[in-house]
Image (cartoon, grey):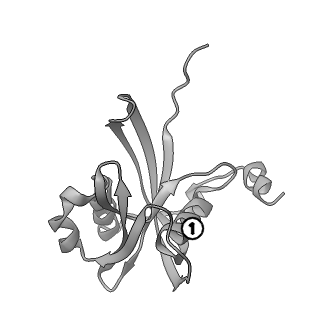
């Protein structure tokens, strides 16, 4: 049997309000870090469903994606397994809704709103270099319509079965 290489697919929400971006402060294996509300794509969900769910779980906010800011590939050497891990990140911007009265996901310490300048000042505390890159792409006006993303109906339909 041969090993099959599989990249990890993640989603992230780029949420801006009055010049500030919604971030989560989280515990990681590298210490406490800042990240956008983000996480892995779960089985049988679309990318849009994943970013909505992750924002609710990690930041306790409703979120409706309206555009794709960018698609990013990054590779890291896992300190735990000593193997290379590849991530494919789909970053979305959209409309933030109500703050929900619910606990944050395990490992999330708090939510925080930061300006770009504040983000630049704490880059060593970012979960990934993609945190600032996604904000910069958002500020540069990079947007693709959600219609460029196609999810086969049988996949999404399985969620509701």
Along the line of sight, which residue is nearer the eye, 73 or 105?
105
Task: Give the residue at the far top of this rendering.
Answer: 1
User: Residue 24: x percent and y percent?
Assistant: 38, 68
Task: Give the residue at the far left of this rendering.
Answer: 121
User: Residue 99: x percent and y percent?
Assistant: 51, 84
Along the line of sight, which residue is nearer the eye, 64 or 32?
32
Instruction: Tell me the residue at 19%/56% (across/down).
Output: 124
Instruction: Tell me the residue at 58%/55% (across/down).
Output: 149
How crowded pointer 1 is (Cα within 10 Å; few <14, some 14-19, many 20+) is rated as many
Q: Secondary structure at mark 1?
A: helix
The quadrant in which residue 139 appears is: bottom left
Q: Is residue 105 left or right of residue 86?
A: right
Q: Quadrant of the C terminus?
A: bottom right
Across the whole image, how many numbered discs are drawn on residues? 1
Q: Is residue 8 left or right of residue 80?
A: right
Q: Which residue is mark 1?
A: 52
Instruction: Tell me the residue at 29%/82% (across/down).
Output: 19
């Amino acid at each position: 049997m041969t090993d099959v290489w599989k990249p990890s697919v993640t989603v992230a929400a780029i949420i801006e309000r009055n010049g500030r971006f919604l971030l989560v402060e989280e515990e990681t294996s590298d210490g406490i870090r800042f990240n956008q509300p983000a996480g892995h794509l779960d089985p049988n969900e679309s990318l849009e469903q994943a970013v909505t769910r992750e924002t609710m779980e990690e930041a306790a906010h409703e979120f409706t994606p309206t555009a794709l800011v960018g698609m990013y590939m990054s590779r890291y050497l896992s300190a735990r397994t000593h193997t290379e891990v590849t991530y494919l990140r789909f970053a979305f911007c959209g409309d933030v809704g109500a703050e929900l009265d619910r606990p944050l996901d395990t490992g999330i310490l708090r939510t925080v709103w930061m300006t770009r300048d504040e983000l630049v000042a704490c880059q060593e505390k970012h979960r990934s270099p993609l945190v600032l890159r996604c904000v910069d792409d958002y500020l540069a006006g990079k947007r693709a319509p959600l219609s460029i993303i196609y999810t086969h109906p049988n996949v999404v339909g399985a969620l509701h079965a």
